[in-house]
Amino acid sequence: MRSVIDILDLSTDELEDLINVALDIIDHPDKYADACRRKKLATLFFEPSTRTRMSFEAAMYELGGNVISMTDGATSSASKGESVADTAKIVSCYADIIAMRHPKEGAALVAAQNASVPVINAGDGGHCHPTQTLADLLTIRRELGRFSDLTVGLCGDLKFGRTVHSLIGAMSRYPGVKFVLISPDELRLPDYVKNDILDRCGIPYTETASLDDPMPELDVLYMTRVQRERFFNEEDYVRLKDSYVLTPEKLARARQDMRVLHPLPRVNEISVAVDRDPRAAYFRQAANGKYMRMALILMLLGIEVR
């Protein structure tokens, strides 16, 4: 039995296999319609979610399986003091695979260590979000055709942005990748990510507070929202929340083959006027998440579709 807690749990060969399965699902959905018949996915979401939870559930339904859900920790036994470990043991009695989101970093790992079925980390605090990265990777592949020799701009909340941390881990394994880290000083990428991934792997990166200056050199611009729920101080959130707003005027400086990604939800950081630009890939990115989660569910359940 195997779980996926961090994107680095998957090798680059496995990522390639997952992408190939997702592309086959896109081309031949009927072939997969009964692949998970009589299998159950439990979605345990202790934090609010729209895209991640619904895409997991849609993924399982489109594979012919069923879903049981917990969408509010306040209505579960966690509100009575039940531990994550005990929750994982109990839910393993009812489901074949678990997707879990939790506000505490490391909670998904604890669940995986105690569950008797595979656990997928659907986001743990500000740590990582591997299945969002799977969606990101499929989007980059479909939009740009490669992972190597790309300059990736990461903009906004790089301190608490678990999607950013996971994407850096994944992309750092491909040759010729460079990062431009765009954030206010208060939201810079944590030192442990720079030390453990970028510096250790010799990945070139620059840090800047400007969105305008690096725009012409980017292949990918990965926008993120400033996350109110990660702040302890409302004044700090209000001061930083509109640090970067991508508009058509700013996008005019970018190359025509550049792509804009965003894990969503957005607040103010991308003008709705940008949605009409063909370089805006974030809604296509959300759709890609479903296909990659379908592929991951199949892999962890050991199901091969011929």
Image (tube, rainbow, N blue to C red):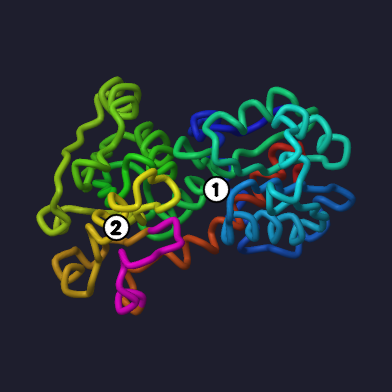
**Residue visible at 23% across and 41% down?**
186
- The image shows residue 9, relative to residue 60, as above or below, that is above
Q: On the picture, is 102 further left or further right than 246?
A: right
| Number of the front mark, 2 or 1 | 2
Q: Nearer the viewer, residue 268 or 293?
A: 268
In this view, the residue in front, 15 or 248, is: 248
The residue under label 2 is 238
Specify the amino acid type for callout 1.
Ile
Residue 256, horizontal then vertical, whole percent: 23, 67
The stretch of residues the image draws in magenta is 262-275
Q: Dividing the picture into quarters, in which one does residue 177 lie?
A: top left
Q: Label 1, on which residue?
A: 19
Image position, residue 255 (x, y; %): 19, 64
Look at the picture and state if 277 lies above or below 264: below
The residue lying at 25 percent from left, 49 percent from top is 153
Rendered residue at 69%/23% (across/down): 113
Type of the residue with mark 2: Val
- Specify the quadrant that holds the N terminus: top right
Report crowding for label 2: few under 14, some 14 to 19, many 20 or more residues within 10 A (C-alpha): few
Tell me, yes or no, whether the highlighted magenta stretch contains residue 270. yes
Q: Name the secondary structure under disc 2.
A: helix
Whether residue 306 is visible = no
Magenta stretch secondary structure, dominant: loop
